[in-house]
Amino acid sequence: MDDSPHGKAVAAVNAMSLAERVGQLVMAPLYAGSDPSSLQDLIVNQHVGSVLIIGNWNSGTAGVAAATSALQSYAPANNQLLMTTDQEGGLVQHLQGAGFDQMPSATDQGTMSTDQLRQSAAVWGSQLKSAGINVDLAPVVGTVTVDRATNGPVGALDRDFGLDAAGNADHAKAFIQGMADSGVGSAIKHYPGLGSVTGNTDFTADGILDTTTTLDGAEINAFNSVLEANPSMVMMSLATYQAIDPNNPAVFSSALVTDYLRNTVGFQGVITSDSLSATALSGVQPSDLGVRLVDAGGDLACIGAFDYVQQVLDGLNAKAAADSDFADKVTQSAIRVMTLKYSMGLAS
């Protein structure tokens, strides 16, 4: 028997029903102030395998730990949840209160040496770990190529390291390594970068066509070099890239996800989405969101709106039941998610 994380994942997924495989591809949100039991049915009966801790949690590490512990109690002991949050620093730090340091913005982190940043990230990671978070959906690797004030998703919010592409990559690696030093995974985002658009995909469908990013530019090369630091996931952008695939947002682009990131760059890990309930995708039926992600080669449907979760699950289950080729993609994605879980000690 293959005793590697991948080998164990193959065996585990082979023993799963189709609905169990689908559940591993969905990340459901728990908002600050919501009762963890609101996700119990999704985790117990629909096999949802990941949770996004979202909103403004001011209850400190103890309050977050109480919620994450309750959530994990609903999951099988041998297949625990990927427990994620957006803890970048500055304006994007969902978890606050006693036990959580106030993190400087990524732009301020960019003024640190990489050694300093790694040490700081290890401290922040240990705080996340104590709260039951095992993956930080950070860092932002995008390089701002337009006026910072007009770059709604990144520059205007100081979410980038504020350097050139190579400097941003070096700092991203340090952040990832620091998190890993504390046993916390990371997700680089928003592939292939949101530094050249004006619109923030969370809140608008306007101004999200990137007309400059190419497959051989410095911006995407920075992302690819950061893969050397072994982030847990790559998070796909919801913007559209005219020079790469003008017909699909990155998250739904098989040209970008499969042909390029998987086959050319060689990344075989978990590919997640930015929130599929974001305004940028408001023209897509909720039941189609997960299907389009997996069809393009992605694995994990990150969903910021609770109301969307059931529709995404239903869409994936219906498509997989009706289409054996798509069911094969579901299986491969479930294997990638489970490989990550085995490598992190979440599955046994």
Image (cartoon, rainbow, N blue to C red):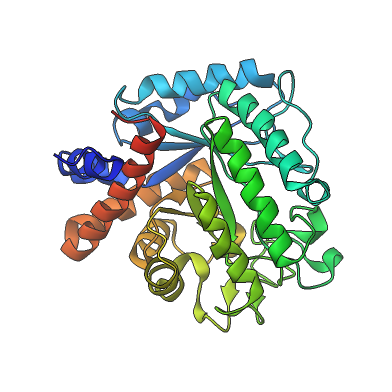
- Residue drawn at x 16%, y 62% as measured from the top left: 324
Q: Is residue 29 above or below residue 144?
A: above
- How many numbered callouts? 0
- Residue drawn at x 21%, y 59% as measured from the top left: 328
- Residue 305, image x, y percentages: 54, 45
The image quarter in which residue 73 lies:
top left
- Residue 318, image x, y percentages: 25, 55
- Residue drawn at x 52%, y 71% as measured from the top left: 249
Please name whichever residue, 37 or 101, is drawn nearer the observer in this view of the structure: 101
Please name whichever residue, 31 or 220, is drawn nearer the observer in this view of the structure: 220
**Residue 53 visible in the displayed image:** no
196 on left or right of 9: right
Viewport quadrant of the N terminus: top left
Q: Is residue 290 above or below residue 148?
A: above
Give the residue at the far front of this rendering.
Answer: 115
Viewport quadrant of the C terminus: top left
- Residue 6, image x, y percentages: 27, 45
Please name whichever residue, 109 or 72, is drawn nearer the observer in this view of the structure: 109
The image quarter in which residue 60 lies:
top right
94 on left or right of 40: right
**Residue 311 visible in the displayed image:** yes
- Residue 108, image x, y percentages: 83, 47
- Residue drawn at x 63%, y 15% as measured from the top left: 62
